[in-house]
Amino acid sequence: MFENVEISDRSRCDPVPSVAAMTEEGVRLLSRRRGAVAGAVTVAAALAAGELVAAITGVTETPLLAVGSQFVDRFAASLKELAVALFGTNDKAALVIGTVAVTLVLGAVAGGIARRAAWLVPALVLVLSVVGFASQVADPRGSVPLALLGAVVANGVGFGTWRLLTRAAPRRGDNQAAAPPSRRDFLTVSGIAATAAAGTAALSRLVAGATGGASSMPDGIVLPEPPSTVPLPDTAAFDAEGISPYVTASEDFYRIDTALSVPRVDVGTWRLRIEGLVEQPIEIDYEQLLAMPSVEQPVTLQCVSNQVGGDLVDNAVWQGVPLLDLLAQAGVQASAEQLFSTSVDGWSCGFPVSVLDGERTALVAYAMNGEPLLPEHGFPVRLVVAGLYGYVSATKWLETIELTTWDERDGYWVPRGWAKEGPIKLASRIDVPAQGAQIDADTVIGGVAWLPGTGVRTVEIQVDDGPWQECELASVADGNTWVQWRLPVTGLAPGRHRATVRAVDAEGNRQSVDVRPPAPDGASGLHRREFEVVG
Ligand SMILES: Nc1nc2c(c(=O)[nH]1)N[C@H]1C(S)=C(S)[C@@H](COP(=O)(O)O)O[C@H]1N2
Ligand SMILES: [Mo]
């Protein structure tokens, strides 16, 4: 009691106002514009500090990416069919930039009204760091202590910056009153703080890159010689027409996932668990998996979000262990209805156990086109199941396989409005001529058609309203892949023309002419191209 009185007494007659008092005074003296600048710079500094801590400690889901991921997970539902395609590639960068922009705007708004509520900006920093912390902890790869460390540092840096920018300059010759710093002083301090924030952010990207970013993959992985390989057909003549090559290069293979940063998986500690309705749960490491008898087979993968004529479909040669071999080790119970798989980043999907009939290619795959999987395609291990859309089957960065009942679990996209079962639909696409191309009277129409797991028997082309003409098909390894097709046409009249393609599968079923969007279970309808004959 007594001491308190003494302290407050002393501060009252202190000739130089304390920094704390100056800050409060400074906030009150803040013009709206200065407040906005100070608020934005403050949150930028806090954000940059949080990112740097994550980068230095090797956390992949930095606060920023973690918040972005939460956004993806929470709002993907309302984006419906956009969602899967949206999170393909560039839009992820846009999401991160958008998150930063929103944060800065919040800082500016809070700073702009800070003189009426001095606590607003520090409170915003606190709230943002709690959001960043919670998002990081929500990620399966997250670490509570590291996320906490980041949040504490971000708060410290945020408060410090705010203090620095809102400190009032003592008025000359007047010890009691404080004045706002000159415009030049303010701009200098906020400029330095903003530059420091930007520098820190850049540094954290660098550090993240150095500690092994998306492209880090251990050297020296020696793939086992696959005892059984499906020989690849010679398709050079078709490839040369500008038709999609039979085997897609790994770098060109379409990429779809919800991951804002490609998960980095350490093969030294990675384990695949098979659990649930099994006789004996098993755990297997990377070396053990590579030591098992493997197969190498081409399989065409397709995303359910692919539009008619779209390019979210590609063909690669996959090496891995047949899923049934691994399941046999664990012993699947008769009550198991669903094979539910989860990735290291918490994504999940499931398909009926009954699709594993011994005929269908279904692999726990570790190699693509003769190389270990690329990080963005699931390194170290992913699932590949012929004939099912990726969103129900093709788990990348695979971690667990759970045998369960059909109703017990729903994969990531199911509550977000997509069908629980996702068999690929028979489809065909025209690759050449390009839409709107100007071509000669003699040309080749060509493209690909696919129904992985079953195969394609015939492809037909209709030019304008003419008769359906049967196309020449390239050889395929087997029915798990797409087939290239072509039709030479001669003597087309000058002017605009239209080509329409349709396919018949190996069992004699025709491609659906029903025009359907991708949601909820895959697009259908015939692909059409328009072009113009000149000269
Ligand atoms: N971990 C994880 N695996 C995933 C996804 C994902 O978001 N996360 N997306 C799936 C979807 S929707 C598709 S179409 C395929 C795409 O595989 P690719 O990127 O290798 O082409 O991966 C599947 N596996
Ligand atoms: Mo997909």
Image: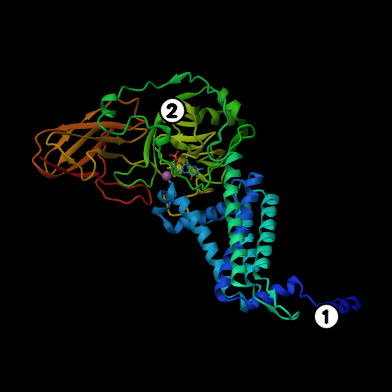
- Would you say the beta carbon of the disc 2 residue lies within 8 angstroms of ligand 1? no
Image quarter where the C terminus lies is top left
Left or right, 312 with reference to 292: left
Query: CB under 8 Å between callouts 1 and 2?
Result: no
Residue 126's place in the image compared with 284, above or below, is below
Q: Position of residue 273 (x, y in %)?
A: 60, 36
Q: CA distance from mark 1 to mark 2?
A: 79 Å
Q: Position of residue 383 (x, y in %)?
A: 49, 35
Q: Position of residue 395 (x, y in %)?
A: 50, 40
Q: Residue at x 35, y 31 (%)?
A: 481
Q: Position of residue 250 (x, y in %)?
A: 43, 33
Dot 2 falls on a residue whose secondary structure is: loop
- Residue 131, can we see it? no
Q: Which residue is mark 1?
A: 13
Question: How has the structure been colored for display?
Answer: rainbow
Q: Amino acid at mark 1?
A: Cys
Q: Residue at x 40, y 22 (%)?
A: 230
Q: Residue at x 69, y 56 (%)?
A: 153
